[in-house]
């Protein structure tokens, strides 16, 4: 895994109905959904563009709710050393949800939270190839990462210390405060905002790029999902949609108007 430390390398959906979710996302985003052929992850599905895998899907494990897991999307941050990263995360106020473990042919990973309780994975992949799961301009890839948190200032410090993510300006959002942009290695990767009081719990959101935002919104509705917000234009000329899939999982799309 030659991606620099702190690069997002994978995205994963935990769902209550993988068959239905696979069909839905294939139609809405354009992914191919196929079973993972390696060891150590039975029942795992890979979401792919025509060029490469960009994410995966698994059934929410039995009893997961009691452990604080719910259906949703999670991101994997690539690190140089998983055990060292977990130690640094806990020293920085985060917690370990799933200890570091190895999956044959896949890599070593741990599920952790930041100090505000937001879940994400850290991983050292077994492959020597670059991950292209995050590619801001490529159709079907993740184009943006957005953290809604209860403590914006603390989150910016934490992620900066852990992964080298740096603030690169901000955009005022009225009563919501500033939308603070993040860079990694000099390139924009996302932003951090204060969670809305009446909104979803603190979480990372991942924006997947589609070629036509209006067509994608129509497919969401036709496929049994719900468009919760948008299409809305954002700086740069793209439009975003916030939606829920048929299993109730919130997801985000970004794309142009055709």
Image: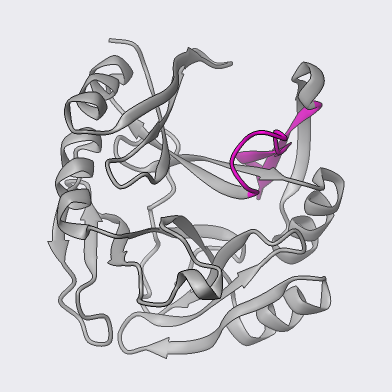
Front in this rendered view, residue 102 or 50: 102
x then y, percent, for residue 159: 74, 57
Quadrant that contains the N terminus = bottom left
x then y, percent, for residue 107: 41, 82
Front in this rendered view, residue 115 or 80: 115
Picture quadrant of residue 188:
top right
Q: Residue at x 27, y 87 (%)?
A: 40
x then y, percent, for residue 61: 36, 74
Picture quadrant of residue 63:
bottom left
Q: Based on the picture, tell me whether residue 189 belongs to the magenta stretch.
A: yes
Q: Is residue 59 above or below residue 126?
A: above
Quadrant that contains the C terminus = top left
Q: Left or right? Give the position of 210 relative to 20.
A: right
Q: How many marks?
A: 0
x then y, percent, for residue 240: 45, 23
Residue range in magenta is: 177-202
Q: Residue at x 29, y 67 (%)?
A: 59
């Amino acid at each position: 895994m030659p991606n620099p430390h702190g690069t997002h390398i994978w995205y994963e959906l935990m769902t209550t109905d993988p068959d239905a979710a696979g069909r839905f996302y294939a139609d809405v985003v354009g992914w191919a959904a196929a079973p993972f052929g390696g060891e150590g992850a039975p029942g795992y599905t890979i979401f792919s563009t025509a060029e490469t895998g960009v994410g995966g899907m698994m059934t929410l494990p039995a009893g997961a709710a009691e452990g604080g897991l719910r259906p949703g999307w999670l991101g994997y941050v690539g690190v140089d050393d998983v055990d060292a990263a977990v130690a640094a995360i806990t020293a920085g106020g985060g917690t370990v949800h799933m200890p570091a473990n190895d999956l044959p042919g896949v890599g070593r990973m741990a599920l952790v939270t930041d100090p505000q309780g937001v879940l994400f994975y850290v991983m050292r992949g077994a492959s020597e190839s670059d991950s292209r799961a995050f590619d801001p301009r490529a159709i079907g890839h993740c184009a943006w990462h957005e953290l809604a948190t209860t403590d914006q200032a603390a989150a910016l410090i934490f992620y900066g210390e852990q992964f080298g993510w740096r603030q690169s300006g901000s955009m005022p959002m009225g009563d919501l405060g500033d939308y603070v942009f993040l860079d990694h290695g000099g390139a924009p990767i996302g932003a951090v905002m204060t969670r809305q009081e009446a909104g979803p719990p603190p979480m990372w959101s991942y924006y997947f790029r589609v070629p036509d935002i209006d067509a994608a919104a129509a497919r969401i509705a036709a496929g049994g999902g719900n468009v919760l917000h948008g299409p809305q234009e954002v700086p740069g000329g793209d439009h975003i949609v916030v939606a829920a899939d048929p299993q109730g999982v919130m997801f985000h799309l970004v794309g142009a108007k055709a």
